[in-house]
Amino acid sequence: MSEVAPDPRFVQRLRPTPADIDELGHVSNIATLRWVQDVAVAHSHALGWGWDRYRAVGGMWVVRRHELDYLAQIEPAHEVELRTWVERWRAASCVRRTDLVRVGDGGAGGAEVVVARAATTWAFVQWPAGRPTRIPDELRRLFAGA
């Protein structure tokens, strides 16, 4: 009998709020970027790593780089699923991927439509000094689904 590793992806659904909509009538670029950051934080919290726990180990995540490809619009009535996972690890940083998917999209025959893809480089830094520091092994294992 083989064991199946837990799925390292974290999924969160949302609908745009009026504050997310820009002058063109769709979700703004800034709101999309905020969602990418917010789902990463939610993933960490879901694994039991909130701000208090990070402070206790003396480290915090900070964004070093965001890359965001916009592939289609998100309109006010759309439901969006954010799917995020850590793709690559280094000693003191990682690259997290996030796909934003319109679900149950009537315009596409009910199919899912990937509307944006993001890659974020997160650095793990000493708190409060801000210097890069090694990512705790426990944290790596949790995000890897081990």
Image (spheres, rainbow, N blue to C red):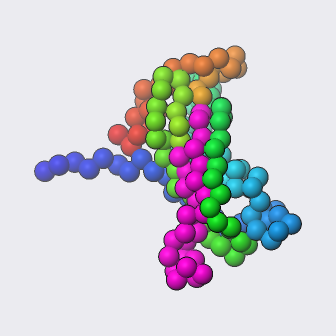
Name the quadrant containing residue 133.
top right
Question: Of helix, strand and loop, which mostly describes the magenta segment?
Answer: strand
* Image point (63%, 53%), residue name: 69
Residue closest to the eye, 56 or 77: 77
Residue 106 among magenta residues? yes
Asked if residue 84 can be seen in this view, the reply is: yes
* Image point (22%, 48%), residue name: 3
Q: Tell me: residue 79, above or below residue 7.
A: below
* Spot occupied by residue 12 in the image (x, y as percentages of width and height): 56, 59
Q: Which residues are magenta?
A: 97-122
* Spot occupied by residue 124 in the image (x, y as percentages of width and height): 58, 26
* Spot occupied by residue 34 in the image (x, y as percentages of width and height): 71, 50
In the visual, does 126 lie left or right of 112? right
Residue closest to the eye, 139 or 26: 26
Q: Tell me: residue 28, above or below residue 118.
A: below
In the visual, does 96 lie left or right of 29? left
Quadrant containing the C terminus is: top left
Residue closest to the eye, 17 or 33: 33
Q: Tell me: residue 80, above or below residue 55.
A: below
* Image point (60%, 19%), residue name: 132
In the visual, does 130 lie left or right of 102? right
* Image point (42%, 26%), residue name: 137
